[in-house]
Amino acid sequence: MANAHRYIPMTEEDRAEMLAAIGAGSVEELFRDIPEDIRCRGVLPMSPALDEPSLLGHLKELAGRNADTGTRASFLGAGIYDHHIPVVINHLATRSEFYTAYTPYQPEISQGELQAIFEFQSYICELTGMAVANASMYDGATALAEAAALASGAAKRKRIVVSRAVHPEAREVVAATARGLNLELVEVGYAPDGSTDLDALRRAVTPETAAVLVQSPNFFGCLEDLAAIAPIAHGVEGLLVVSANPIALGLLEAPGKLGADIVVGDAQPLGIPQSLGGPTCGFFAVAEPLMRRMPGRIVGQTKDIDGKRGFVLTLQAREQHIRREKATSNICSNQALLALCASIYLSTMGKQGLIDVAALNARKAHYAAGAVAARGGFSLPFAAPFFNEFVVRLPEGVSVKDANLALLRGGYLGGYDLGLAYPELAGHMLVAVTEKRTRGEIDGFAAKLEEASA
């Protein structure tokens, strides 16, 4: 019997044949283990069947209800940022030789993919000031957790000290990893200026400390004094792990030159779409002595039998390739396609372009901070230097949730409610400003925020 639904190739004969193969008389019989009294016998609350043009129109109408960065000016950051994405990235990254490529186990047919990964590694080394970078990680949070695990193994210690100014979701991932590895996780608070409390850090770091984990710019957007933190970690022969914003590294000194032993972060600002929160691409770079402990894989440069330059998977320290007891991680892959996006972005922008973008982020954020702070009842509680995010204290009695709803109605995506992760910062909003925001949008946001808080 022919199938009435051409897009569903299974016929009634196919269905009967499969039921006979498993010894069932009907489809109903397959569900006999489900008690009768909890089965749904009615009709599910769904719309009737639609033809294709009607369905496309319906879905378009539903999508139009979303408030996104295409219809609103976004001042929301907190880890995922609305940066400009050059159109060439999508054009190149969606070519079939990249878009459909999988793990490059066979270098003889994977030279393009391997070269792209090698160039990503090279860019990350240059940005971070580190000797070696891997082929990428799943995201910045898992990269930070893997850095804690690496530090524990390298130092043969179990104590990890992490700043409370590190992204709260990243700290949750670190904590989950720490539980699995039986690590002791100690959190250190932030100072009144918004940066890590160095006195508390000194008290927390002991001879049992494997590593100090900080983020700069931190979750509040404040810059950390890495040159002052490094001696604290190194004083007990521990490691300094820094989570960094790659765009900020266009202006700031590379963490590797300030004493960092491991530098991680999320490459999402480098030409990777927000995509409602992911997927993103983590980067992971280390000083040379730690190279063989690094998770994931490294692509290396070599020569073929004819003396021509070629690329191969050089170092793979996961369970699939070596004995389990010698594995440093169970990370099984890398974000090659998104790493390619980051590489294309950095190639397109060039050194000066990255500096210019970073400068625009910093200048526009500082202009926005001034525009908001000039309004009655608003203040900037943290005095530490910041990059493209800053914290705003709303007038007394005004909730961030209510302010954000009013901003949304006015055409803006407001900032992150810090009270969600920091109870002591209820009524404080984390505002992000990227190079995409115009003076008009910033002024309009400040005015609408004041109106919403009136």
Image: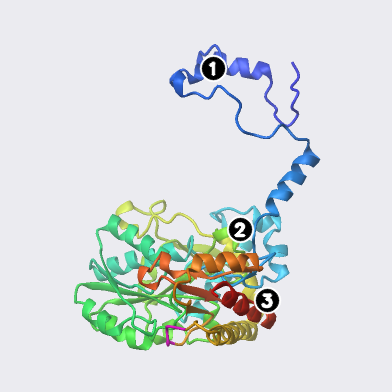
Identity, as a three-letter code, of the amino acid under mark 3: Thr
Label 2 sits on residue: 110
Q: Residues within 10 Å of mark 2 (few under 14, many from 20)?
A: some
Residue at screen point 24% across, 82% down: 202
Mark 3 → mark 1, Cα distance in angstroms: 59 Å
Mark in the foreground, 3 or 1: 1
Label 1 sits on residue: 28
Q: Is residue 312 left or right of residue 234?
A: right
- Please, what secondary structure does the residue beneath circle 1 have? helix
Residue extending farthest to the right is 53
Label 3 sits on residue: 348
- Please, what secondary structure does the residue beneath circle 3 have? helix
Specify the segment rendered in magenta: 380-384
Q: Residues within 10 Å of mark 3 (few under 14, many from 20)?
A: some
Mark in the foreground, 3 or 2: 3
Secondary structure mostly taken by the magenta-highlighted segment of the chain: loop
Q: Position of residue 104 (x, y in %)?
A: 56, 56
Position above or below: 175 against 44: below
Residue extending farthest to the front is 454
